[in-house]
Amino acid sequence: MSVRTRFAPSPTGYLHIGSVRTALYAWALAKKNNGSFILRIEDTDRERYVPNSIKFIIQELNWLGLQPTEGPSKSELIQVGEDIEGLSLEWSSHGGPYIQSLRKDFYKRYAEELLQAGFAYRCECTPEMLEKERREQILAGKRPGYSGRCRYINVSPEKPYAIRLKLPQNFSVTANDEIRGKLKFENPPLSDPVLLKSDGFPTYHLAVVVDDHLMKITHVLRGEEWISTFPIHWYLYDLFGWEKPKFLHLPVILGEDGKKLSKRHGAQTTAELREEGFLPSAIINALALIGWTHSSGLEIFSVDEFLRDFSLEKVHSASGMFSPIKLKRINHEHFKLMRVDEFLALIQKNLGLSLRLSESYVNVLKERTHTLKDLSQLLCFLIFPNEYDFQALEDIDKQLIISTLELFKKTVNENLSRDELQAQISAISDSINLPKKHVFKILRVAILRRMETPPLIDTIQEFGFNWTIDQINRFLSEFR
Ligand code: GLU
């Protein structure tokens, strides 16, 4: 049987790195086995749905290079009101719909089946009644949970009703997890869960089991946070008499302080990481390492290298840490691994600069680049050529600045080596009795506009004598 994995995000407006790690392993498992990687949208919690976030998820997966082989069609997206402008969907949509709000008939059918068989019951309790019950339980010091009121009464099908699963007395389940082995749940703290709400929408428990079955998923990869409801899912498979997929609950991702990742740990959605200038390949590299280890201990690898080495056996159960510092280091290494043409293409794509640079100058830039933001800072003199940091020169006499530059223009020429250029600058410093540090500062601001720049001498050599003189003239005309 061919491997079929799925990524089942809820369209809440962002993509968290925890979800990306799940998607990555599911994608890799399918890809390694020539199987299918399915994108299914779990939009049944209507309160959390953010318009156009399905489109956003698709774009993010694209950016990361985690292409599904099956997923929603354009017409599905239109039906749920998503904007499809600019989207090209390169996957099959034959087994759809892949958006859960369009699959309500399936859930209804299977919930009714359980009802008929006596494994579920109609519940007429309103949110107000449930809230009242909850409050009373808390006040009485009891664990809040559904009392089972409607289990014992006959609820008329004429009234609005939800369908609840009837959990057996002394409910106990031994479920299998591929990472953790056998998990025994004895009387887990669960009360009869709702399967189908009165508005016809399923809950996660029903939808996930029905869809994983109908979509013939062979491996369910998801976050550890779903373990507490795992016995319900296992039990539902047994009730339906369906063959179970393999389950893998991936270890939780913690912050560097060992606590669950939260906002105070900094950027952790794909959009935030992009904004901070991280490369998709580095994000993938960093996330791959949370819960899995390369067999030769490699810490820096490309997506292809990851794919070659990935196997489920090497996924472990211990929680892993997400370290922004480590991600930055990995990002830096990914810049260093780029070929010159790749690096220049990246500059073109992200900074809109079409440049031809020597390999040695590209190396100078790479050495100083941890994120794309660093790169845009370094190349600011090309991106915003009219923005001078005149303030940086405030502590130097205006006339001295002008003489330094005039002198530099006279003494430099095309044939000077690095050392000779250095020597010329020293000579200027001596002749006008201005500390060398100041001469450097003047040249840096005049030629490169500001103080945070690539090394001055390397840049002069890279862009050449004529360009350098042009920059100085440009500066002088603004400065005088
Ligand atoms: N919709 C769930 C989420 O966004 C997915 C859970 C699952 O993969 O089963 O976390």
Image (cartoon, helix red, strand yellow):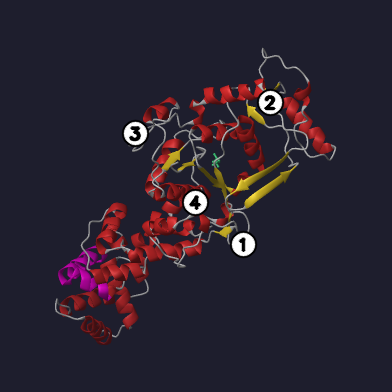
Task: Choose the circle earlier in sequence order: 2 or 1.
Answer: 2
Asked if marks 2 and 1 touch (Cβ < 8 Å), the reply is: no
Q: Secondary structure at mark 2?
A: strand
Q: Secondary structure at mark 3?
A: loop
Q: Tell me the kind of residue under disc 4.
A: Arg
User: In the image, what residue occupies the spot 40% across and 54% down?
Assistant: 280
For disc 4, the marked residue is: 21
* Residue 343 visible within the image: yes
* Residue 388 visible within the image: no
For disc 1, the marked residue is: 257
Outermost residue to the front: 1
User: Magenta stretch?
Assistant: 457-480
For disc 3, the marked residue is: 85
- The vertical placement of 303 against 84, above or below, is below
Mark 3 closeness class: few <14, some 14–19, many ≥20 residues within 10 Å: few
Q: Name the main secondary structure of what is drawn in magenta.
A: helix
Percent position of residue 16, x then y: 51, 48
For disc 2, the marked residue is: 120
Mark 4 closeness class: few <14, some 14–19, many ≥20 residues within 10 Å: many
